[in-house]
Amino acid sequence: MLNQAEYGKRWRRKHPVTYTLMKIRWYTRRQHEWDHKLRRHRCGWLTSMAIRHGIIARPTHCQSCGTGCKPNAHHDDYSQVLDVRFYCRSCHNEADKAREERLGIERVRPTKRHDLTRAEHNRAHRLWASGKYSQRQIGRLVGIDNSTVSKIVRGLTQPRLGIRREPAS
């Protein structure tokens, strides 16, 4: 019996043209997202090198709220590597949300147990019981994190009453 990795290697060797077409199709569908991730990673690496070599000085406080901490570097535009602001964690999260809204980037953030509405919990459970969807697909359909779907399926989490949150669309 072959494990999944070995089976995949054999299949790719046997069907090189099909595999190449699948890769091209996957990349073209996700090209904008992938390019964004590469730019972000490159920009972060270059910024850390600039800080390490003294080109950019990291302040000892947040530039937004003034909290004394070791702030994180934030870029409004990843093409401007040296245009950096330093924020504490909470201010950095707010700045990231503002940038994602401005650029139209959607990202599913992990959902805490107490944030689940009863409707989201029940919908995820019904989708799982139907047997038609994977945990990843359920997470995307309901708008919750995959690990939360896993906990719902295993019965490790329940929605809390009295907490109302608009379901993710």
Image (cartoon, rainbow, N blue to C red):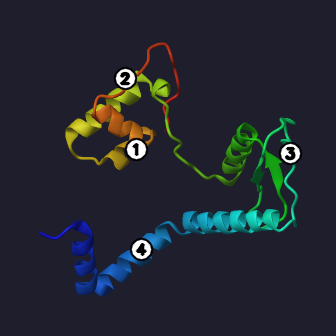
Mark 1: secondary structure: helix
Mark found first going from the N terminus, 2 or 4? 4
Q: Is residue 118 left or right of residue 89?
A: left
The residue carrying mark 4 is 25
Q: Residue at x 23, y 46 (%)?
A: 132
> What amino acid is at disc 1?
Asn
Q: Nearer the viewer, mark 2 or mark 4?
A: 2
Q: Which one is earlier in the sequence, the residue at label 3 or at label 1?
A: 3
Query: What whole-number distance in Å separates the C-alpha atoms at marks 1 and 4?
Result: 25 Å
Q: Which label's residue is closer to the chain start, 1 or 4?
A: 4
Q: Position of residue 2 (x, y in %)?
A: 16, 70
Residue 158 — which label? Answer: 2
Q: Identify the disc placed on residue 146.
A: 1
Instruction: Give residue 60's mark.
Output: 3
How much space separates mark 2 and mark 4, taking CA atoms? 39 Å
Q: Is residue 157 above or below residue 54?
A: above
